[in-house]
Image (tube, rainbow, N blue to C red):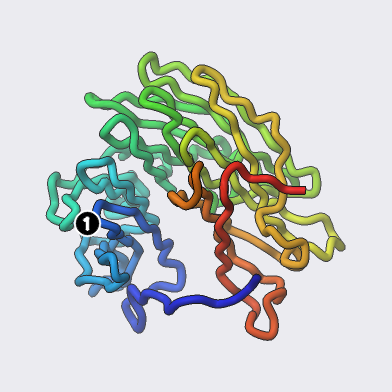
Amino acid sequence: HGTPFGEPVVLADGPAALAVSTPVVAAIPGGRFIAAWSAVDANSGADVLLRPIDAALVPGPPVRANTTTPFAQSNADIVWTGSELAVAWEDTSNAATGPDIVIRTFSSALVPTSAEQRIAGTADAESHVALAAIHGGWAAAWRVVTGTEERIRVMFGSPSQTVTVGPFEPAVETDAPALVALDDTHLLVVFIAGSAPVSRVQGVVVDTATGSMSPTLSVTNGAGETHAPTLMHVGTRVFLAWTAASAVGDVRGDEALIKELLWQGSALDGSRSEFALPRDDAHRLGDQRAPALGASVFGAEGALVGAWDDLGRTFAPLGADGDVVVQTMALPMVRR
């Protein structure tokens, strides 16, 4: 109902904080968390910092993920695989090939368990990496832009395999793909294809046993662009959320939308209709952007946690022009 709760956990402030730090969080055993974000380094570039947060939400000392420090290391993603933390980021230290994608693994105590591994280092622009845990390991997806074409590369397995989705018209620079494991041998990667005046959310299922791919999802926003796809697997359910730009003159502004996808073991059913992420219609006024999804054990079938940037001032008098809103949705989700 728009009531603030709790105190924020401050990870960085002052001169070390970046205006665009792209923070991410992963849950680890014992009710703890690891946060990652980009921070200014001593040479005016950027490092990827990791910080543990205990079960009482008290942060520990930060740890630098990258050992390569020239230029910028940024736009990190992290995932707990069940035995270690995988951390991937963009690296611009090589002027001939950057941005590239680098990954490194850590224990739950943030002790490194591997050196940096450059998993994408070609002359193409490789950026916006997304990670997922699958079958006790990690998988990664990232954007590859060459001239006027874009592709999505997906890496998985040990030894690693890579498959390529595309080409298609590039999305805007800020949009990252989303990646989730459907089961031990299938991944779903979702991404934005195209830009103004109309772009679309597309999805492909990757069979990690065979390396085959099945296009399964295409959602177009007739009013304009789509942005910021995100995925979450809760029990047997898979949820997709994204931002849909509004039509000119629509008082609701940009909307954060959500759609349930049904995984049937060999095929993904995306036929269910999407609906607005905010539960209350009054909270749809103005812009809701950049949705994020999480999973909870609340309820008999679990729950989905949704969050978004709200620019609509609908939480007044406590709200302002730029709130972070969180809601918990028990499953199965029923909307009238």
* Identity, as a three-letter code, of the amino acid under mark 1: Asn
Instruction: Please say whether residue 11 is visible from this viewpoint.
Output: yes
Please tell me in which quadrant of the rendered image residue 122 appears.
top left
Which residue ends up furthest to the right in the rendered image? 249
Q: How many marks?
A: 1
Would you place residue 260 above or below residue 241 in this image? above
| Extreme residue toward the front, this view | 300
- Look at 71% across and 56% down and name the residue there: 255
Image quadrant where one finds the N terminus: bottom right
Left or right? Give the position of 269 relative to 204.
right
Which residue is depicted at the point 77% across and 61% down?
281
In the picture, measured across the screen, residue 192 lies left or right of residue 23, that is: right
Any part of residue 151 in sight: no
Relative image position of residue 156 (x, y in whole percent): 33, 29
Q: Which residue in the structure is indicated by mark 1?
A: 66
Q: Residue furthest top?
A: 210
Q: Give the x, y percent position of residue 23.
A: 40, 62
| Residue 208 in which image quadrant | top left
Which quarter of the picture shows residue 111? bottom left
- Residue pictured at 28% horizontal, 73% vertical: 58
Secondary-structure class at tag 1:
loop
Residue 112, percent from left and from top? 13, 51
Q: Residue at x 57, y 45 (%)?
A: 331
